[in-house]
Amino acid sequence: MSTKDLNFSVNGKSVGYTKYHGVARNFDLVVDEPEALGGEDSAPNPVEYLLAGYGGCLNVVFNLVAKELGIELKKLEINISGDINPERFMGLSSEDRAGFKSIKVEIQLETDADAETEQLLIQKAKDRCPINDNLSNPTPISYVFN
Amino acid sequence: MSTKDLNFSVNGKSVGYTKYHGVARNFDLVVDEPEALGGEDSAPNPVEYLLAGYGGCLNVVFNLVAKELGIELKKLEINISGDINPERFMGLSSEDRAGFKSIKVEIQLETDADAETEQLLIQKAKDRCPINDNLSNPTPISYVFN
């Protein structure tokens, strides 16, 4: 960790077969599964959290870069979706990967910029979005059990 | 998409400079940034959503695999953290990647299994966790603007 780095964390525990209660700073983050996946459907499921974070991340960088470029964002809607073959997760087959095979980001964007500046906004926003990076590229993960 | 695949989605829109309002099925997912990152601190930030989803995902697979192996989970606490150099996000430098440089998963696990079976539980849970896969390995992402 360099002096510039910011640390983010979620601490939590299992509070049920599919239910996790996490805490980030002063916020509670409860995760569950729908009944079809064995849960009680009391909260969004893990991959919905991932997609919501991705949408929130893109929102921040689009606004940030637009401000830098002097562009007004008149409309910004961000819909994100993806397909998962649940067979690996369920232990039925290891043919497909466990996670999203691919992710589709649909953005409705209206600005007061010309087409070239809008493309610059898009390119910079994608490049500077932390979650876009962590999903597009591998991230080293270390596990500690105690 | 094969017939086995499950689709997950979050649809949402920008409701402020750093605030995103997403919807997954019947759930609202509001994302914001702390004041230090230009937000109103009204909700967890994007990468906290990512970490919470990851914790929730590991909780589900540990419980699922433990049940398959006939193991009782007496305790399962999952703390996840990571460091981000915010300079790329802020447009100050492209030296470091935009997202988490690495992620640390700390798990407090108590079971009634022997050490060998516990290792099998850990190995299977990691392999079958969708978010562990999408963070460890690259995921194709397509953007559509309209």
Image (tube, coloured by chain):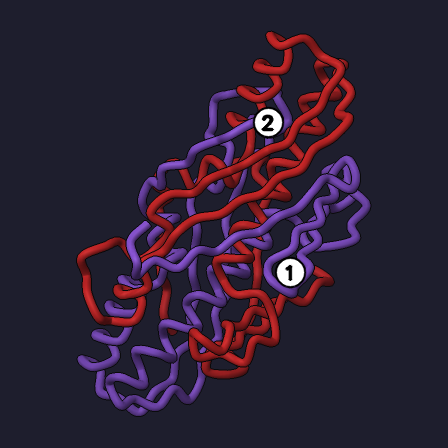
Chain colours: A purple, B red
Amino acid at dot 2: Asn
Nearer-the-camera pick, A79 or B121: B121
Q: Name the residue under label 1.
A: B24
Q: Residue furthest right?
A: A40
- Please tell me how crowded label 1 is: few (under 14), some (14-19), or many (20+) other residues with Cα within 10 Å: some
What residue sits 73% from the left and 20% below the top? B111
Q: Is residue B137 above or below residue A41?
A: above
Is label 2 in a helix, a strand or a loop? loop
Determine the residue positioned at 71% across, 63% down: B27
Give x and y (percent) for residue A123: 24, 67
> Residue A144 bears which disc, if any?
none
Res. B23 image quadrant: bottom right
Left or right for B24, reference B105: right
What is the chain identity of the residue bearing mark 1? Answer: B
Q: Distance between the residues labelled 2 and 1?
A: 34 Å
Q: Do labels 2 and 1 share a chain?
A: no
- The kind of residue tagged 1 is Ala
- Residue B38 is situated, as x and y percent measured from the top left of the image, at 44, 79
Give the residue drawn at x 43%, y 50%. A103
Residue A146's disc is 2
